[in-house]
Amino acid sequence: LGLDPTVRDASPFNPQLVGNQLRITYPLNPAAVGVALKAQWSDNLQAWHESGIVYEMVPETSDPELMQATAPSAPNGLRFMRLNATAP
């Protein structure tokens, strides 16, 4: 994420409830070559899914660029989201 580990920063993640959907906004780091961030959702914190996630770049952001990931709505109104980072 390009943060300085020796400096206390506000969280770079911005979770939101938009209508009945969960959305998380996060910065993209172009220096993180080979690192993939995937949003995942769960209704029980045990089984995590990537299906139905919609990704959109936040318009008119420059440094850093921001990505939004929106999870589908939950039938029972309960939903959790996380970002899963993987690297080769």
Image (spheres, rainbow, N blue to C red):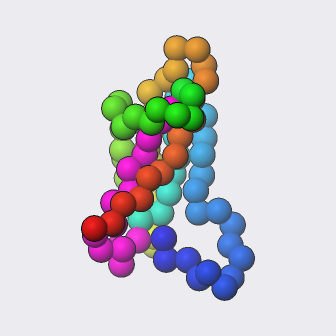
Residue 65: in sight, yes or no? Answer: no
Q: Nearer the viewer, residue 85 or 75?
A: 85
Check if residue 59 falls in the magenta segment. Answer: no
Residue 50: in sight, yes or no? Answer: yes
The residue furthest top is 75
Q: Quadrant of the C terminus?
A: bottom left
Q: Nearer the viewer, residue 51 or 16?
A: 51
Check if residue 31 falls in the magenta segment. Answer: yes
Q: Quadrant of residue 76?
A: top right
- Image position of 3 with respect to 70: above or below: below
- Name the residue located 69 percent from the left edge and 66 percent from the top edge: 10
Q: Nearer the viewer, residue 60 or 51?
A: 51
- Name the residue located 43 percent from the left edge and 46 percent from the top edge: 39
Q: Is residue 69 left or right of residue 36?
A: right
The residue furthest front is 46
- Name the residue located 41 percent from the left edge and 65 percent from the top edge: 28
- Image position of 1 with respect to 15: above or below: below
Q: Is residue 50 left or right of residue 10?
A: left
Q: Is residue 14 left or right of residue 29?
A: right
The count of marks equals 0
Magenta stretch in the rendered image: 29-42
- Name the residue located 41 percent from the left edge and 71 percent from the top edge: 29
The image shows residue 43 at horizontal and vertical percentages of 54, 27
- Image position of 43 with respect to 50: above or below: above
The image shows residue 60 at horizontal and vertical percentages of 42, 60
